[in-house]
Image (cartoon, rainbow, N blue to C red):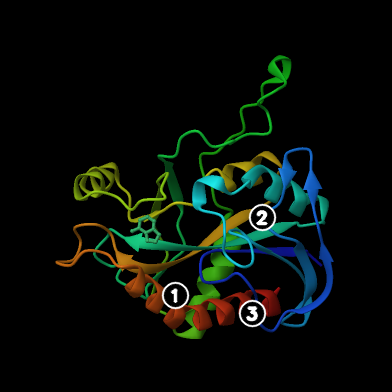
């Protein structure tokens, strides 16, 4: 049976209901992971769980060691990754509480360690990344969202910004022109690193605020935290359905 890994984002630093069998402290050639990788049973099957920002939450998006995290998950036996990301909504359908399973990504980050192929200049490898997310995994997420009765979109371009600050209105206008539907800070380089290590990867994004300029008000951490509280139950139920179904 495929070994699934879940990468929990903001609001999901621990997975209640995970019966932990092992905590794997992981040091990799790229440094330490954000937290121990937890191996355990969730929804009746073996899963790996990693808190992207650490547990408790301590790493901002640009300081997450994405290379160590994905490398360690591979070492721990991950054969598929379900990544959970909190995002801002740009497309009119992407209101707070809405789910998106993106099919494309645009990377606006800079200065992050973003490849395993940096040091070996004689064997530069250019992975194909036309379709950054694994389609069968996306379909499983979409089926689970439908079964849970969640509001969701089966399309979406994820624009990944550097953070940790939120965007200006002009930046969101530009991102919308670029075709972005949602905006977050943690989708990249994670997805590309998973592709480099040939681990199928898909993203379950929860909209926790309208992106800058998409509502009359400024964005507050309180509203984001409330949306995370409101949405995480559905995230966990959706993940459980995916795991129970495969
Ligand atoms: N912008 C970037 N990242 C985010 C946002 C946002 O509005 N909301 C949650 N993560």
Q: Is 106 placed left or right of 37 in the picture?
A: left
Q: Tally the numbered discs.
A: 3
Residue 94, position as x, y percentages in the image? 31, 66
Mark 3 / mark 2, whichever is N-terminal: 2
Circle 2 sits on which residue? 34
Of 136 and 225, nearer the camera is 225
In contact (CB < 8 Å): disc 3 and disc 2? no
For discs 3 and 2, the disc positioned in front in the rendered view: 2
Q: Residue at x 40, y 46 (%)?
A: 161
The answer to whether residue 187 is visible is: no
Residue 71, position as x, y percentages in the image? 74, 46
Q: Is residue 90 above or below residue 56?
A: above
Mark 1 / mark 3, whichever is N-terminal: 1
Q: CA distance from mark 2 to mark 1?
A: 20 Å
Residue 83, position as x, y percentages in the image? 58, 61
**Please, which residue is most extreme toward the top here?**
122
- Tell me the element at label 3: helix
- Tell me the element at label 2: loop
Circle 1 sits on which residue? 228
In contact (CB < 8 Å): disc 1 and disc 3? no
**Neighbours of disc 2 within 10 Å: few (<14), some (14-19), many (20+):** many
- Tell me the element at label 1: helix
Circle 3 sits on which residue? 240
Residue 180, position as x, y percentages in the image? 33, 50
Q: The C terminus is located in which quarter?
A: bottom right
In contact (CB < 8 Å): disc 2 and disc 1? no
Question: Looking at the image, in which quadrant does ligand 1 appear?
Answer: bottom left
Q: Quadrant of residue 220?
A: bottom left
């Amino acid at each position: 049976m495929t070994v699934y890994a879940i990468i929990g984002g903001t609001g999901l630093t621990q997975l209640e209901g995970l019966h932990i069998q092992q905590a794997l402290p992981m040091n990799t050639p790229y440094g330490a992971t954000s937290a121990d990788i937890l191996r355990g049973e969730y929804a009746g099957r073996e899963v790996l769980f990693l808190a992207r920002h650490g547990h408790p939450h301590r790493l901002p998006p640009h300081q997450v060691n994405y290379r160590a995290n994905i490398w360690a998950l591979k070492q721990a036996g991950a054969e598929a990754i379900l990544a959970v990301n909190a995002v801002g909504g740009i497309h009119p359908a992407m209101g707070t509480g809405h789910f998106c399973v993106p099919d494309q990504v645009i990377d606006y980050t800079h200065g992050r360690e973003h490849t395993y192929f940096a040091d070996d200049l004689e064997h530069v490898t250019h992975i194909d990344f036309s379709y950054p997310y694994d389609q069968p995994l996306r379909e499983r997420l979409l089926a689970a969202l439908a079964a849970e009765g969640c509001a969701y979109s089966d399309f979406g371009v994820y624009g990944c910004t550097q953070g940790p600050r939120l965007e200006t209105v002009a930046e969101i206008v530009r991102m919308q022109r670029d075709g972005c539907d949602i905006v977050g800070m943690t989708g990249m380089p994670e997805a590309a690193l998973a592709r480099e290590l040939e681990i199928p990867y898909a993203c379950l994004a929860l909209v926790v605020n309208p992106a800058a300029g998409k509502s009359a008000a400024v964005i507050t951490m309180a509203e984001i935290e409330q949306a995370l509280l409101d949405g995480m139950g559905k995230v966990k139920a959706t993940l459980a359905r995916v795991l129970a179904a495969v």
